[in-house]
Structures are given as structure tokens and as C-alpha cells.
Amino acid sequence: MTMSKMVFKFGDGIADGDKSMKAHLGGKGANLAEMCSIGLPVPPGITINTDSCKYYSDNDGKWPEGLEAQIRDGIDHIASQMNAGFGDADNPLLVSVRSGAAVSMPGMMDTVLNLGLNDAAVEGLAKKTGNVRFAYDAYRRFIDMFGDVVMGVHHAYFEEALEALKKDRGVENDVDLSGEDLRVLVDQYKAIYRKHTGYMFPEDPFEQLSLSINAVFGSWDGDRALKYRSINKISGLIGTAVNVQAMVYGNMGPGSGTGVLFTRNPSTGENKLYGEFLVNAQGEDVVAGIRTPEDISQMADEFPAAYERLVEVTQTLEKHYSNIQDIEFTVQEGNLYILQTRNGKRTGAAAVRIAVEMANEGMVSKKEAVRDLVEPGHLDQLLHPRFADVTAYVADVIAKGLPASPGAAVGKVVFSAEHAEKSKEAGEKVLLVRIETSPEDVGGMDAAEGILTSRGGMTSHAAVVARGWGKPCVAGCGEIVINYSNKTFTNGKVTVREGDWISINGSTGEVILGSQKLVDPELTGYFAEFMSWVDEFRTMKVRTNADAPADALQAIEFGAEGIGLCRTEHMFFEGDRIDSVREM
């Protein structure tokens, strides 16, 4: 079977696709094409459509006829725009390979960076940039990601080698390793790859690319993606698109960096940039929570010109999409590049505030605010409990991290996603405590009342997923040391064991000993204003079930127009009435 157009190009202000093509190009691919068309600084690339993924899934891992030729033509398009050659030993083109379904699924599918490097190309890259350290840092990252994502060699094996080398060299941070150190690390990584796969690391760039595309296609039906779609009730999609894009580098030195930001605060809805960046790092370092980054506001001091341009881009994108945007960017030697934009996941409180303020700003109409910016689940989140008295537990605060997702949560400590899922099945309330979360933890994150991590920032995997679910999260809590083997964490004075009760305040970042009292929330003025708009457009009336006067009063506060069902027999259960009923 020969399919028609399967590969869509973008770059240099021109694109084959646009934002209306999410079903075929995925959200990432459609938005990359759209950003390119409106003149934003987007590295050139190609998007392989979702139909190709479906064909791959339906035909035992085979590509549709003609796909390889279209991909090769697309790679030539990227190479010509970047003035480099795929597999060229002197001037190598390096690309990223990323998934992108029609519905955003943060971290659930696979990514490979720096693809195209081999033993010859890494030397060419070092000569081209005059930076041996940068070249070998890119190479060791590629071997790690390719081994993990494509060949199933667990990232922990590579991480152990990295930590051992840092210890041997007497340094604490990755950036303190020299180019020669990283050259040694590359050899160690290749040995790890060969040990666990039985193969030499592939030198042919197109073989690397083909295997990586297959890995992204395959990740669509992976356990973590299936579980995420099940939890979030995502259905009706045929597969993921694959985005192959020219690499830009945030790890090229102190004049480079990478970051993730939201155009408004996704926790509160405040109209202020919210995000983080890392100097001399690649994007996965921020998203995966491997290093705890700096607040986005500090970027103005580090890269003033790039920050000024970034602010302009955020305003352009928010107005263009009429929604809060979640943006990934890279600064390469002072130059800004936008790698992704998507509608930002937000808490219920933030969703309501953003909808009201965007309508009042004239960015959207009231009807659009009600229809497009707030989901039913967002309103449900507003009914979640909060701490009864935040001053009552001051003496019990044992650590403070980043307030990554607001709300209060109480539960027993568990250290694995599997344990969290089993505990929920047994009817227990737990808090999931991890050094950092990964997509494999999604089932346990869903089962837990809240999440606590010792690494990662406000835009890490744990934070983004927790906010999307309205689940409290404290991230980047560097004051605690987690020991998985002993199933404990400590702040140096107090040790908490698995099964102990703790509480977390996702609005302040506080970690509190013991089970703190929770009470029902109070609704804000934004909620009342938003619901008055809902009344203008709704087509049905709402009555409540009420078995007691208190139920009826609460229903009236929420705007119910009457009582639809009143079980009079339940009234007999209140106070001492039950005794009288029993006597009868």
C-alpha cells in the first residue's frame, strides 16, 4: 500500500501544515508548523504523520511504502537549511526525534536528542564549534537516550557511570567534568550499551534515525502511555506523529541555556510568566527534573536580549492561541529558539481565573471562556479540601520545597508507584515520595493523594502531571535525602519511614509531620463571576440531592435552583433521632 503525503516540512517561515492539523501532525507538529508560519524562531524539521504510526502498529512494525524516501527527502530539507550534512564527518547535522500526539501527554512517550553523532562526527562537531567538551557532552547524552529509549538499556546504568566518574574526579556537578573526562565517559557508555544489547553502538545516522522513529511509534502502545490515556480518558486517537528537528544547543557553554515556561501561572492563574531555565543544559534536564533549575525571572540577568525576545514571543503565542501556553525554548550562544508550544495544563483555580481575566482583557469572549478555557474537571478540583489551620502545624514542618501544584494532601509515605497503586486498592491514603518522577510512575501518581520529590522544579514531570490532575505536589525539596533501600527520607534531624503519616501543602511547599486536619475549600470571586457567565449560556436547570438542611444550604451557595431528590429516611439518622427510630 502506498500512502500519499506522510512527511510534512517546516522551516524558514514556510510550513506544509498548520495548527488545524493536530489529528494528522499531532499537537507538537501542528504547532511547530504554525509557529514557523507566523515568523517565530523555530529550528527547521519534518513531521511524520499519525497515519504512519497506525500503519506501523497494524502491520507488525513495518513502514508504509514510500515513507523512507519521504523521510530522506525531509532530512535533505533540514540539512540544506542548516548548511550541514547528515552523517558528514566534518560538518554533521544533528537532529532530535520527538513524539507528538493530538492530545498532550507530558512525558508519556519517547524523545531522542543529538541523533546523528558517531565517532567521526563527534570530532567534526568539536572542530566546528571549537568546543571538545560540548561535543562529547552531546555524544554521551545521545548514547544514554538512544540506549534507554530505543534499545531498553535502563538510564540508571548510564547514571551510575556518570556518578562514579564525578566521584573519581572530585566534582559534584556534570558541568565540572572536562572534555577529556566526557571522552572517557563516552567509551564507558558504549561499553554499557554493548553489554546490555549485545551490539556495537550504531555508527550509521540513518540506522539511528530509523530505530528511533520505530521507538516513538512503539511508545504509543507502551504501558505508560496506555495507562496515562486510561487515567485521563483519552480515546479516539490513531497514533502519535514523529517530529524530526534540527538540534539547537543549550549546553554549548555559559552563553547558552534551556527552559520551560507558562505564559501565566498554572497554579494560581496570575498573569505573570511562570517557569524555569538552566544555563549550559539541554531541555530534558529541565523537563525530567534531573537538575533543579532557576526561576525564569533570573534569565533577564543572564541573557537580557534573549529574555526580552522571549517575552515578546510569549505575548504573541498567547494572543494567537487565545489560551495559556506551555513553551519550551533554547538559547544557543545568545540566540533564542522556540521548540514547542501547547495549551498549558492548569489547576482548577487557575483555569477559572485565566478564563475570567482573558475575557475581561478582551482576548476571548465570555462564551469562549466558558466553552474553551474551563473543563468540568477543573470545577471539581475547586471542591477539594485544604488545611484547617496553617498556623497549627508550624512546629511540625520538617522541610520546604517548591510549591509545584496547590492543595493539601495527607497520607502514609510510600516510595514506589507500585506500592501506591496497591495501597489505593486496599483503601489506604498514601503520599508518593520520589527523588524524581518519571513517566513510569504515572499509575502511582494517580493513586496517591499527593506527590513529594527531592529533585526537579516547577515544570518537571511531577509538577506538570500533578497540576493537570489537580493533585497537590511539592517538588525540588532538596532539604530531604531519600533512601529507597531503607525506605526512609530524612532532613538530617528527623527520619520518616515508609508507612508514617505526613502532610504536604502544595501551595507553600511545606512538608509536615503527621496527619493534619483538612476542611472544605472556600470559593473565590473568580468562581462566582465565571458561574454567572455559565448561567447566561446554559440550557438546563440544576437541582440538587439534599437529605439535610446543611446540604440544601450548600447547594444554594453553588447556584442550585431547587431540590430534585430528598430522602426523608436519611433525616432520621441525624443526632439522637436514630435512637427513636430504633425504638419504633
Image: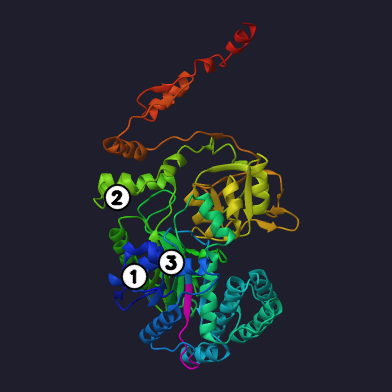
Q: Is residue 270 magenta?
A: no
Cα distance, mark 3 to mark 1? 15 Å
Say if mark 2 contacts mark 1, CB within 8 Å. no
Say which of marks 3 and 1 sits in front: 3
In the visual, does 259 lie left or right of 570? left
Q: Can residue 503 be seen at all in this image of the molecule?
A: yes
Residue name at image x 26 percent, y 46 percent: 360
* Residue at mark 1: 33
- Which sits in the foreground, 274 or 242? 242
Label ID, residue 358: 2
Q: SS of the residue at dot 3? A: helix
Give the residue at the far front of this rendering. 1
Identity of the amino acid at label 3? Thr
Say which of marks 2 and 1 sits in front: 1
Q: SS of the residue at dot 1? A: helix
Residue 344 lies in quadrant: bottom left
Image coordinates of residue 439 in percent, x first then y, are 57, 60
In the visual, does 485 lie left or right of 509? right
* Residue at mark 3: 50
